[in-house]
Image (tube, rainbow, N blue to C red):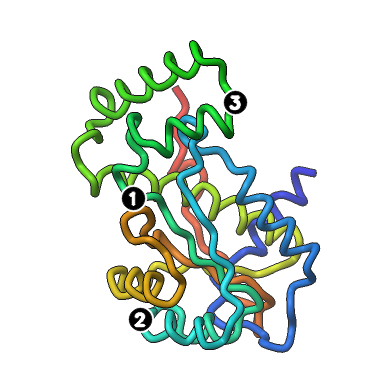
Amino acid sequence: MQKKILDAFLFRHAAKDFDAARIIPEPVFATILQAGRLSPSSFGFEPWRFLVVQDAALRAKLHAFTWGGQKQIPNCSHLVVYLARKGMDTRADSDYVRDFVDRVQALPADVQKMKLERYEAFQKDDFNLWGDERALFDWACKQVYIALGNMMTVAALLGVDSCPMEGFQQQRIDEVLASDFGIDQSQYGVACMAAFGYRVADPRPKTRQALHDVVQWF
């Protein structure tokens, strides 16, 4: 099992071009999506949304403002746009969070109160997020990247390639998402994108720092 896991990490790379003729089987991609859905997030509040963009015309709209995905967006089997909830939606006093602890997490009333008080203290005192919309959005993006990482790892375990992408004009992409996808900009902003599919060519050997250069034991 250990070898299988490490082999998947060695297999995974940021594929720059995909074989447009090869489509990921539906059950395989469903598993990748489930890996995102089941990912952990701080306080379990899942401040994400995943847009699977298969329509060529909509991909072209995104492609125009994505300098880091010129080959990936047109040719990949599946394109995912990762959205993060905007700042005030993630505050402890927001309708989203209060509904989440009640409807999704189904916590008893006394536990809800305790959790929301702890969450508010975390945002105000521990991480200094409360009054800063950009800081709250960036914090939500951190949670989204957990889902992104899990989806890419599961893809690699299934023999599927991927490429995370931040090489885009964030404001222009948000505008496209609002005008062409119907995304409410007051609730969501783009965090990143990822292309999934099958590589055209093998990459060069993986380079990483040695384990002893990045790990300290105490």
Mark closer to the chain start, 1 or 3: 1
Residue at the left extreme, as displayed: 131
Considering the numbered disc 3 on the image, is that residue within a helix, a strand or a loop?
Answer: loop
Other residues around mark 1 within 10 Å, as few (<14) / some (14–19) / many (≥20): many
For the point 37% across and 18% down, the residue is 118
Q: Quadrant of the C terminus?
A: top left
Q: Earlier in the sequence, mark 2 or mark 1?
A: 2
Write down the quadrant of residue 123 in the picture.
top left
Q: Quadrant of residue 157?
A: bottom right
Above/below status of 162 relative to 217:
below
Viewer-proximal residue, 216 or 68?
Answer: 68
Which residue is under mark 2? 65
In percent of width and height, residue 73 lies at 52, 81
Judged by depth in the image, the label closer to the viewer, 2 or 1, is 1
Residue 154 sits above or below residue 27 on the image: above
Indicate the secondary structure of the residue bearing disc 1: loop
Residue positioned 46% across, 79% down in the render: 69
Q: Residues within 10 Å of mark 3 (few under 14, many from 20)?
A: few
Position of residue 69 in the picture relative to residue 108 (left or right): left
Q: Are marks 1 and 3 in contact (CB under 8 Å)?
A: no
Quarter of the picture holding the N terminus: top right
Q: Nearer the viewer, mark 1 or mark 3?
A: 3
Residue wearing tag 3: 106
State which tag comes first along the sequence, 2 or 3: 2
Viewer-closest of 107 and 48: 107
| Left or right: 21 in relation to 138 | right
Determine the CA span between mark 1 and mark 3. Answer: 23 Å
x and y, in percent, of residue 48 in the image: 48, 50
What's the residue type where badge 1 is placed?
Lys
Of residues 15 and 138, the one drawn nearer to the viewer in this rendering: 138
**Residue at label 1?**
86
Where 172 sits versus 134, above or below? below
